[in-house]
């Protein structure tokens, strides 16, 4: 990629094409647990370079407002959340969840300004453990399309949240990179002959393969793409392959292969051009893992591994992620505790925005190449005034998209496995047909 192409892929602030693309999708603003109680402390949130404040009013309704008070631009994050509104401390102006000014104590009771004053309010929805916001034109807001984990009870959804000090695209590329798990996370995902698929224990996910060089096959769809990493298993390698399928749902969601106890989904959400919020959801309709155990396993306990409110890491680039070289000598591959921190060490060490112009991609990078090409072209399309990827028919409901892992017999097409709706295949065929006709048109 040229530096100019890299900017189109990565930058989201202001009028950047990728930011305009993303504003045609719903975004997770925060976890519900962060604003759980009526009249709770207002929460400062930043998405796509925009600052907002999230609060729950006295009636339990969620409000998402522009952080700056429209009067003199003081921050509403310091405001009083009381009596069904958020009151600015500076002059006492108060706004409800819809952005209406319900009190302007510094203005005369008959002031004309009282009747017309509003602040920017973002449409919002609560679902699946998150507060979601629409950042585009409210008049064009689409119906909220719930992700697959919304089908699970709240008690079966566990969420890790962690701040990443780098651009969203390099974080997402890590999520869709199946090959790195065999090296970077090899101490957390060790080989075990006695298992037939990914098997979760309290401390590790056991794998039925020692193959570090998977064969990748990719299928593009209207929602993004899905791909499989095929590895040679320990048992009956001449009869079967160990398959791990990953799904990319544009623009920021990845469903990675599950284990025998819970499904795994990630959202790599741009805070701005050079910061990302990393969410990792473990979920299952009946089994699952508790929030406490999930955060402990990931090394992401609030107050211990990540700071409250900001979710900035205790293990970070400045302290080398507390890497333990003695632990490495005794057998641990990275010396860094927790899968997310191991990933962050790689992502953040690339720089705030990775320079992709000198990358030397290999056969294990097919998904990376597909992501870069697909999203670059999707941003170009938005720049030309076309709809964003994933917003046109045929649309596949997000709830129908689930990854899988396990053994498949030699000769069986992975594309036919775990397809819950024929639209997934249909949409892939239409993407292929469109790509055949437009291959020469892309820059």
Image (spheres, rainbow, N blue to C red):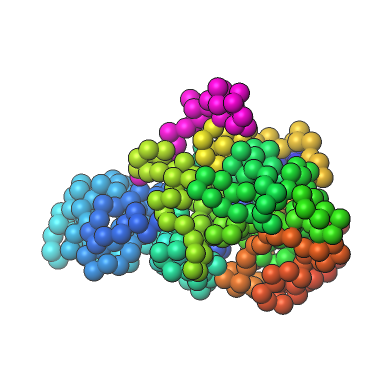
From this viewpoint, which residue is outermost toward the front?
Answer: 194
Q: Position of residue 400 (x, y in %)?
A: 61, 72
Residue sitting at x 30%, y 67%: 61
Residue sitting at x 62%, y 68%: 401
Number of on-image labels: 0
Answer left or right for 61 relative to 109: right
Residue 332 seen: yes
Residue 173 is inside the magenta segment? no
In this view, 328 is above or below 163: above
From this viewpoint, which residue is outermost toward the bottom?
Answer: 422
Which one is in front, 228 or 312? 228
Residue sitting at x 61%, y 29%: 331
Which one is in front, 118 or 191? 191
Q: Position of residue 19 (x, y in %)?
A: 57, 53
Answer left or right for 81 relative to 178: left
Residue sitting at x 54%, y 59%: 261
**The image quarter in which residue 357 lies:** top right
Which one is in front, 347 or 20? 347
Residue 328 is inside the magenta segment? yes
Answer left or right for 364 relative to 290: right
Q: Which residues are magenta?
A: 309-335
In this view, 149 is above or below 315: below
Residue 54 seen: no
Which one is in front, 118 or 313? 313
Q: Position of residue 28 (x, y in %)?
A: 47, 58
Q: Quadrant of the N terminus?
A: top right
Answer left or right for 204 relative to 71: right
Q: Position of residue 55 (x, y in %)?
A: 30, 58
């Amino acid at each position: 990629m040229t530096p100019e192409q890299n900017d189109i892929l990565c930058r989201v602030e202001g009028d950047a094409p990728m930011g305009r693309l993303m504003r045609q999708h719903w975004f997770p603003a925060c976890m519900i647990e962060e604003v759980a109680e009526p009249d709770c402390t207002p929460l400062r949130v930043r998405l796509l370079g925009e600052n907002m404040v999230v609060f729950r009013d006295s009636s339990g309704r969620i409000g998402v407002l522009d952080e700056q008070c429209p009067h003199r631009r003081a921050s509403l994050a310091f405001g009083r959340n009381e009596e069904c509104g958020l009151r600015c401390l500076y002059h006492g102006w108060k706004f409800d969840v819809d952005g209406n000014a319900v009190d302007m104590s510094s203005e005369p009771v008959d002031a004309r300004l009282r009747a017309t004053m509003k602040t920017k309010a973002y449409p919002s929805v609560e679902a699946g453990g998150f507060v979601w916001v629409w950042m585009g034109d409210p008049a064009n807001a689409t119906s909220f399309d719930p992700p697959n984990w919304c089908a699970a009870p709240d008690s079966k959804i566990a969420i890790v949240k962690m701040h990443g000090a780098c651009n969203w695209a390099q974080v997402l590329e890590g999520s869709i990179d199946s090959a790195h798990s065999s090296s970077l996370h090899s101490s957390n995902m060790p080989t075990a002959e006695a298992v037939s698929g990914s098997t979760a224990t309290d401390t590790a996910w056991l794998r039925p393969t020692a193959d570090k060089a998977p064969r990748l096959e990719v299928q593009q769809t209207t929602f993004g793409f899905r791909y499989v990493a095929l590895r040679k298993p320990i048992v009956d390698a001449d009869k079967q392959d160990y398959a791990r399928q990953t799904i990319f749902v544009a623009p920021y969601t990845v469903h990675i292969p599950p284990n025998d106890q819970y499904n795994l989904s990630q959202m790599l959400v741009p805070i701005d051009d050079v910061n990302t919020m990393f969410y990792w959801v473990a979920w299952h309709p009946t089994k699952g893992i508790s929030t406490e155990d999930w955060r402990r396993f990931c090394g992401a306990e609030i107050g211990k591994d990540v700071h409250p409110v900001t979710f900035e890491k205790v293990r970070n680039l400045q302290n080398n992620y507390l890497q333990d070289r003695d632990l490495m000598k005794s057998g641990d591959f990275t010396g860094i505790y927790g899968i997310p921190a191991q990933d962050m060490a790689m992502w953040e060490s690339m720089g705030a925005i990775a320079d992709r112009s000198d990358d030397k991609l290999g056969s294990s990078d097919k998904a990376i190449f597909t992501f870069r090409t697909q999203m670059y072209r999707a941003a170009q399309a938005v720049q030309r005034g076309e709809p964003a990827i994933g917003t046109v028919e045929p649309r596949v409901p997000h709830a129908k998209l689930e990854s899988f892992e396990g053994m498949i017999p030699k000769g069986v097409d992975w594309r036919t496995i775990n397809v819950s709706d024929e639209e997934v295949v249909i949409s892939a065929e239409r993407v292929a047909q469109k790509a055949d006709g437009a291959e020469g048109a892309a820059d």
